Amino acid sequence: SSAQLIDQGLLADHNDKLAARVQADYDALGSMLARRGQDIERLTTLAQGFAVAVPSWGAGTGGTRFARFAGRGEPRNVFEKLEDCGVIHQLTQATPAVSLHFPWDKVGDARELRQAGEALGLGFDAVNSNTFSDAVGQEHSYKFGSLTANSAAAREQAIAHNIECIELGRAIGSKALTVWVGDGANFPGQHNLRGALERYLDSMRAIYAALPDDWNVFIEHKLFEPAFYATTIADWGTSFACATELGPKAKCLVDLGHHAPNTNIEMIVARLAQFGKLGGFHFNDSKYGDDDLDSGSINPFQLFLVFNELADAAERDGAAFKPSYMLDQSHNVTDPIESLMSSAVEVQRAYIQSALVDRAALAGHQQGNDALQAAQTLKAAFRTDVGPILAMARIRSGGAADPVAAYRASGYRDRAASARPARAGASSSGIV
Ligand code: LRH
Ligand code: MN
Ligand code: MN
């Protein structure tokens, strides 16, 4: 069994105090759902099986390009980040894996990471490479690009880093590499648009060739920033074309914040699923761009609609359909542990709401061109408060009825603050 960072007795007391309320709400919801022909126990089992990975870089306070206001007791290294991720999983029982980012999370011997994860009951999802900033002491700068750089030496170095990430990932049991590059141009004419993508593909071919048989590489697109005029991998079309060009192990990763406002992201999800290229997600929310706000905090209906497409794909493709679910957030004004727990629960909520959609009725309304009833069928699921199902799932799995309340009662942040004294100018992510 794994180390428990929140006292089990405290957790039991917390759940005991809320048990009667959760049970009453659960019973009321259960009879309401039964009248709609839904079995609440089926949904609770689904909720217990749900998992979304936590980004190691989310455990610290993020900051913006203007400033970073450090939080108390921030993790100072990957092992402390893993401890915080352990707490998130202990209380939510929905985040059994962590997504690491190299070189931020690099340690001398990667097997130590695996052991630290095991001790906390955590596995590892996709590993992320970083060629969007220069690591201390690296020979060639990525100022003018990495996998697309004009400099062959910079490209070689970026390829070697990605291959090293695969090696590190193998040591910890990951099965995928996520590649996001900030490469692109800030000025019209700065680079040859087609030439840059050709260089990207050449570089990615070398990385692809280093993938173990049971690995995938996820291509993460992003509309803009840091390249404000022309980002090389700006959209799902480019991502899809590159994944197709590279081969079956290459798939697309959808970070919800990486699109223009009002983009129909659920349709992108449907398209990628249709063509077998949906590799995974970075869940977060946004109002304007790559805001990295908590999942479901701005547009929970969009998150639900994404999961509605995932439910459709799962129904069509069965077990073969298995995209990776990861959070990717940055926290400036909240305790990162609280935000990550809330977000994991929001994503799980969207999943359960999508499981409530009466798919046969929806298909009937679509066939009959009854737009109003089709929309109402989705809304009926979205409007249902599935909170009692999520709480019951957590209690049954050994988590907390109310993760944020249990976390606050535990005093974990105070203990972390004394165990991890602040360093001037410290940055958890490496972005200073
Ligand atoms: C880029 C991104 C990508 C990075 C992470 C730190 O905006 O979404 O996933 O790896 O942020
Ligand atoms: Mn991302
Ligand atoms: Mn991003």
Image (spheres, helix red, strand yellow):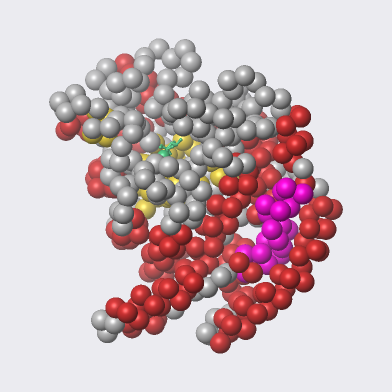
Instruction: Please state the horizontal and vertical placement of residue 191, each as a whole percent of the image.
Output: 19, 25
Instruction: Please state the horizontal and vertical placement of residue 396, each as a whole percent of the image.
Output: 71, 64
Q: Nearer the viewer, residue 276 or 410?
A: 410
**Residue at the (47%, 70%) spot, across then down:** 382
Res. 424 visible in picture: yes
- Magenta span has 337? no
Instruction: Please state the horizontal and vertical placement of residue 169, each as a whole percent of the image.
Output: 52, 35
**Residue at the (77%, 61%) spot, across then down:** 15
Q: Quadrant of residue 317?
A: bottom left
Res. 201 visible in picture: no
Predominant SS of the magenta segment = helix
Instruction: Please state the horizontal and vertical placement of residue 289, each as a whole percent of the image.
Output: 36, 43
Q: Quadrant of ligand 3?
A: top left
Horizontal side of residue 323 vs 201, given as left or right: right
Image mark count: 0
- Magenta span has 402? yes
**Residue at the (16%, 33%) spot, across then down:** 194
Q: Residue furthest bottom?
A: 35
Q: Quadrant of residue 238?
A: top left
The span shown in magenta is 389-409
